[in-house]
Every structure is written in structure tokens, then in C-alpha cells.
Image: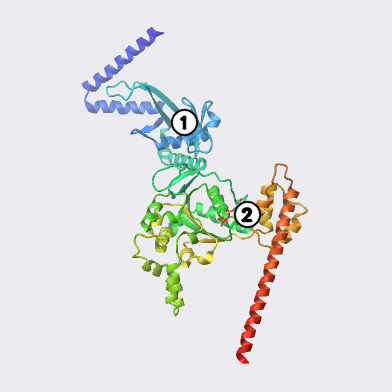
Amino acid sequence: MVDTLTELCSKLAGLMFILGTIQQLVPRSFYERIKTLWHRFENYFYPYVQITIDEYSNDKRNEVYSLIKVYLGTKSTNDAKYLKAEMFKKSKSLAVSLDEGEEVIDEFHGVKLKWNSYKETFTDNSPGGRSQLPIEKKCYTLTFNKKNQDMVTGQYLRHVMEEGKAIEFKNKKQKIYSNEEGEWYWYGKGMWRHINFEHPATFDTLAMDPTKKEEIINDLVAFSKGKDYYSKVGKAWKRGYLLYGPPGTGKSTMIAAIANFLNYDIYDLELTSVKDNSGLKKLLMETTSKSIIVIEDVDCSIDLTGKRKKKKKKETTNEEEEEDSDSTTEKKSDKNESGKLTLSGLLNFIDGIWSACGQERIIIFTTNHVDKLDPALIRRGRMDMHIEMSYCRYEAFKVLAKNYLGIETHPLFQEIQRLLEEVDVSPCDVAENLMPKNASGKPEICLENLLKVLKKAKRKASLNSQKNKNSSTKLLVKTYGRFKKLFE
Ligand SMILES: Nc1ncnc2c1ncn2[C@@H]1O[C@H](COP(=O)(O)OP(=O)(O)OP(=O)(O)O)[C@@H](O)[C@H]1O
């Protein structure tokens, strides 16, 4: 066997020598002609093209290789016998990929394409070689018929990249970023720190009016698929949502549900930690696409209304002008306030020219006092959808009962429904009472507890209204007395 191999090697070496000699002896044009004929001959018997994609390119990890790996992970399960399952830091599930030496046949528009995975191990012994340790070189090869070359290098590889990106996006771990001064458990450099975002809220668990919920879901879907639409109408691909309502009605829960629904990261922007307008701009530039920028309790963050109020006092005579002025006057009035975070800085952050420095972004404001906000800040176009998160009514209660107690109907539901139409309690308070207080907590006990709370709230509400009535009557009597004295 060894003898045969040695003989074969020496014959090959002889052939190479002869070819080399021919190249030197015959005229170049004649040599080129032979080469062309050889290629034709080769194409006739082996009409295939092979593309190699290395794991590293110029000492950097090749992103194309990573995307192909992700793509082939979904294709390989049917064909390949040996697969690898890996847990990546950034991925929330196990990633399956093709093991080395395996082969997968893919099909695209009726064309068959063959993928192979290879690994080569060698030692770099060259002077100045990096180390004596074995070096691994991995690659994929794609083999296809030459006649499909244009389609493969164009449409097919683009399809592989897009699919790979979509799978990577679906599997990525979501993050929540904060611009507050770093605590030990936040990671990252730059102006934002992050940790993994693992909030369990979804639209299924969110208690609110079902029609309103559906409207929001449809809006989000339209937004996330709206790349072409936004570019057609010449608008930056972003959308603003204003969530307002009393405490405990689910504004923060809604943000988590939106993030989970779209698989976006969250940037929780704390305005009180922002020094000035340029700091705000820098923060914006460091956010990524497919993300939600949240400013919670925007009315409490900075004094965004002060100037407008002062202006109103001065301009008592011309209220209409005040309304029309919108942001323009506001922008002019605080243009000179460098070194400060101003309303104009925030307006620019939302929809100024810089706001288009990333794509597919949602901005959400939450507030308990929508009336305290400057109209310029929440006008349509900046905050495209105004969503009121309100007190818990029967439809919302049913969602909570299903979440917390796993029941969809109960004889006590009727009385609860009647009371929920009469009293204002937040979903947070309802949820708190539906939570079983011990492991054997029966639904009846939780529902009875809730009934007690609702009845108490009703009594309190009627007492308050009685008190209000009394004080109004007293005021009326007092005023009548004063008038009477005046005319006596
Ligand atoms: N609509 C809702 N659906 C489901 N759970 C809710 C809802 N509203 C409140 N909850 C529950 O109450 C808790 C508090 O709600 P959340 O923080 O979302 O309210 P919020 O409106 O943001 O309150 P605040 O204005 O005080 O910040 C949540 O952890 C959640 O369990």
C-alpha cells in the first residue's frame, strides 16, 4: 500500500514537472489555448463551482460565516447525521449547527445547492509563527452548477444572509439599558449600561380592553413591517407612544409586553441623569435599531412646562398665538440655554434631524398626569398613539383571573362585574388580591377577598361623594349668606 502511494506521488510530481516544462517551452498563446480547452473539458465532466467561506477573514470573525452557520442550523436537521448544539452568550436558546465533515443539500427556486462544513487543524511553524499550539481553521463550502452562478451569488446568498439575520434576531437575548450611573450588575462601556431583559409580561397577560389591545398590536405589527412604507413617504422609521393613566394601571407592564412582542431591546432613559442637550444627543447616537426608548414619568423628570406657563402669564391677551406657536417658540426661547437639558433638546431628541440616526425605533413616554405635559411634546407626529391605561373593568378582570387563578368563569364573577363598573380600582390592586396568599390558596378565597376590597372601595367612594356634596352645600349657603348681607 505504501509502495503504491509512493509510486502515485512520484508520478504526480513527474506530471507537474512536465506541465511546468511545457509552460516554459511552448509559446504563451499556445499555452493559454491549451488551458482554455482544458477548462472546457473540465466543465463538461465537472460543471460545478465551489465558494469557500472562512470563519475568519483578516484575523476578524467573518460575519457571513456566522450567518451561514445560523441558517444551516435550521436546514441541517433533515439531512446531516452529526450536529452540534451550542449555547451562545447572546442567544436565549440552544443553537444547532452542522458538525465538521457534514453535508447539507439546500434547495432554492428549484435549484439544488450543496453545503459542506470543514475543519482543518495545523501548527504554525513559520518563523514568527504565533504558537506551537494547533490552530483550527473552519470553513463552509457551497457547491452548485455553474449555470446557476448568477442566481446563487445574487439572490440565494442574499436570502441566506437575510434568513440568518432573522433567526439570529429571533434567538437573541433582549437587553435593557440604563443611563444611570453604573451599579455593579450593569455591564458595558459608553453612556449606556445593560443587563439581560427577562420580563414575563406579554399581551396575553396584559389586562385591558380587548379592542384597545388589538388596536395596539395591529399598530405595532404595521410599524415593524413598515420599512418600505416609511421610506416611500420619506419619514424616519420610528413611532411614538404616550401611555397615560393612574398609578398601577399597567404602563410599565405594557412597555415590557411591547418589547417582548417585537423582541426589541429597551433603553430606559433617566432624564434627571442627563446633563444637557448635547448629552441627550450622544445618548441617542449610542442606541441601536430595533429598540424602544422609554422615558417613564416624563412629567416628573425635568421641568418641561415652566417656561410655557410663564409665557402664558405674559401672553394672556393672545391665547390663539400661544397654541399655534407649538414647539417653534419654545425652541427659540430656550435656544440660548446651553449647558442645560431643555424642552427643545427633548423635542429634537424625539424628531429632530438626529433622531433618524438609527432605524426601527419606538419612543414611549409614560405619565400619571397627561395634563401637565407640554402640548408640543405629545402632539401627533411626536407621540403618534395616545394610550390611556385605565382602571380595571370586567374584561381586564377576566384576564387577571385567568392569569392568577387559572379560571375563566365563577359564580362570584357576576357580583364582581357589577362592582367593577361602579368603583375605580387599578389592575395592580385587583391583581394583588387575586394572588393566592399560600400554596393551597383556593380561587374562592381570592375572589371573596377581592369582593371585600371592592365593597370597601365603594363605601369609601360614596362617603367621599357625600362629603363633597356637603361641602358644596356649605359653600353655597355661605355664598348665599354673603350675597344676602350685601343686599340688606
Ligand atoms: N393592566 C395590567 N395587566 C396586568 N397586570 C397589571 C396591569 N396593571 C398593573 N398590573 C400589575 O401591577 C403591577 C404594577 O403595574 P405597573 O408598574 O405596570 O403600573 P404603572 O401604571 O406603570 O404604575 P406607575 O404609574 O405607578 O409606574 C405590575 O407588576 C403588574 O403585575
Q: Is residue 330 left or right of residue 441?
A: left
Disc 2 versus disc 1: nearer the observer: 2
The CB of the residue at mark 2 lies under 8 Å from ligand 1: yes
For marks 2 and 1, give the CA distance: 56 Å
Q: Quadrant of ligand 1?
A: bottom right
Query: At 45% from the left edge and 78% from the top edge, which residue is drawn?
Result: 316
Indicate the quadrant where residue 251 lies.
bottom right
- What amino acid is at disc 1? Lys
The residue lying toward the viewer, choosing from 62 and 118, is 62
Residue 187, x across and y down, in percent: 44, 42
Residue 441, x across and y down, in percent: 72, 45
Name the quarter where the N terminus is drawn.
Answer: top left
Query: At 69% from the left edge and 50% from the top edge, which residue is drawn?
Result: 434
Circle 1 packing at 10 Å, graded few (<14), some (14-19), many (20+), is: some
Q: Is residue 277 left or right of residue 242?
A: left
Residue 89, x across and y down, in percent: 48, 36
Q: Is residue 487 left or right of residue 329?
A: right
The residue lying toward the viewer, choosing from 128 and 406, is 406
- What amino acid is at disc 2? Cys
Element marked by disc 2: helix
Residue 105, x across and y down, in percent: 50, 31
Query: At 69% from the left edge and 61% from the top edge, which residue is drawn?
Result: 457
Provide the residue designation for mark 1. Answer: 114
For this orientation, the residue located farthest to the right is 411
Element marked by disc 1: strand
Q: From where the camera sits, is residue 279 visible?
A: yes
Q: From where the camera sits, is residue 422 visible?
A: no
| Marker disc for residue 428 | 2
The residue lying toward the viewer, choosing from 319 and 66, is 319
Circle 2 packing at 10 Å, graded few (<14), some (14-19), many (20+), is: some
Query: At 42% from the left edge and 76% from the top edge, which residue is drawn?
Result: 314
